[in-house]
Image (cartoon, rainbow, N blue to C red):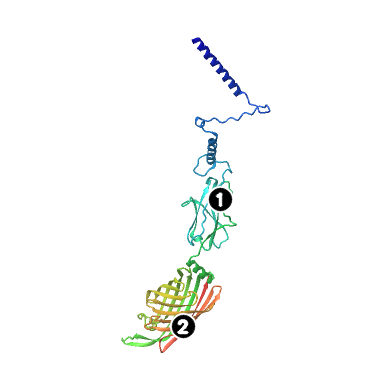
Amino acid sequence: MRNGRTKRFGAIALAASVVLATSVSLAQEPSHDSAGKAAPEPESEPESNGADEGVDDAEAGPARAAESEVREGESGGPPGRRGVKAAPGAAVPELVHAPVSAARANEALRINADIVYPQFVKRALLVYRPAKQKGYREIEFRRGAPGPYVAVLPAELVQSPAIDYTIELERTDGTRQAVFSTRAEPYRVQVPEDGMDSIENALSERLDERRSVFSSRAEYVSFGKSLATVERDDGQLDEREVNDRYYRIEGGYTYRPMRTISEFSIRVGMVRGSAPVPVRELLPGQSEGERFDVGLNYGATSVRFRMHDSWHIDGSMLANVTEVGFSVGTGATLHIGDPYGSKISLGFEAIQTFGLRFFTQVDIQAHERVRVSPIIEATNMPSAEDYGVRLLGEVGLDLGYGFAVAGRGGYQARQATSGGPSGGGTVSYAF
């Protein structure tokens, strides 16, 4: 029985060997098409590790595509990714920029941008053209907040009505490319005027952009004869008539910002005259008449403030040297109306030891180039005890090209029985 089983098992093993050999032979034999030609062998696939053996064709395609995208990003992607550098021309630098639509006048303007592939960019340039100018200027973008790249236009360049700009990239190979707008058709940022800018521009245009003024004036004032009380050698008081008069010469410079500070001036001048009271003790070798001589050499500055379109106020300070020493002075004037046209002015001026004056002046713009001004003044200058009243008239004429002249004349008196004339003029040049 044991021999029978052994023979049966041997027969089965032999049959299995024959079948296996036949299968291997068929698998190694090349297939043929209908024409009897052998079909080409399929290309061999790259060897895969054990983890890939369970991935079918549907899953392998997207996996390989994702792997390909990652490798492309590594070869030339944005900053922050690792990998080999891309071949020249494989990546083009780009700009990410949100344009600014409007800006405030006289405030710095920040232009922000981001650069894709900055490793291929040598410089990023903001090319801008300020208002009312023809040529372009350049500012280089820098790292900064809120960034990542920022270019800052200074406040003095941000002026109404607008500012134009474009952005250009200069690549590492030296070529330059406009990536946002162009110089031929730049992007425009609107810069609206604020109220003060509008006022300044309107006044400046009205004055032909002439903000600086040089001026000189001279005036002679006589109150006629006044009675002066003097003490004689015997101690008795005596009255005598003296000439009550003075003249004034002054030169000045004025600049007109035409904003909250409408204008400011500096002036230098001198005054000489005789007062109706003795201003100092009689010195040895000095005549009695010299006791009544007065004068001062002064320097002054004044500022005009704009409170409203029709309300302006001047404030002034004065330092001077008189016949009795150093003294100071001050003054103020309120202007109601057009500062460079028809208006009324109310003011005063006080100079230590020399006197005080109050005045009102009405400027009437009779013609585009002609101004007529009646003036009333009350003063105790020079160094008088009594006030006198002055009635004056002034006519101003605009000669054009910045030149202007004015002439004044009138009459004044301290006493009903005596008075005298006055006259003077002003010459100015504005540029």
Q: Residues within 10 Å of mark 2 (few under 14, many from 20)?
A: some
Q: Which of the 4 quarters of the picture holds residue 390?
A: bottom left
User: How many numbered marks are there?
Assistant: 2
**N-term-proximal mark, 1 vs 2:** 1
Residue wearing tag 2: 392
The amino acid at mark 1 is Leu
Q: Nearer the viewer, mark 1 or mark 2?
A: 1
Q: Is residue 389 left or right of residue 185?
A: left
Residue 274, image x and y in percent?
A: 41, 82
| Label at residue 183 | none
Q: Is residue 66 above or below residue 274?
A: above
Identify the element where label 2 is drawn: strand
Residue wearing tag 1: 169
Q: Is the Cβ of the residue at disc 1 closer than 8 Å to that at disc 2?
A: no
Residue 359, image x and y in percent?
A: 42, 80
Residue 8, image x and y in percent?
A: 52, 13
Q: Is residue 138 above or below residue 388?
A: above
Q: Is residue 353 left or right of residue 362?
A: left
At horizontal 48% and vertical 65% (from top left) the residue drawn is 194
**Res. 189 in view:** yes
Q: CA distance from mark 1 to mark 2?
A: 70 Å
Seen from this angle, which residue lies furthest right? 35
The amino acid at mark 2 is Leu
Q: Is residue 271 above or below residue 116?
A: below
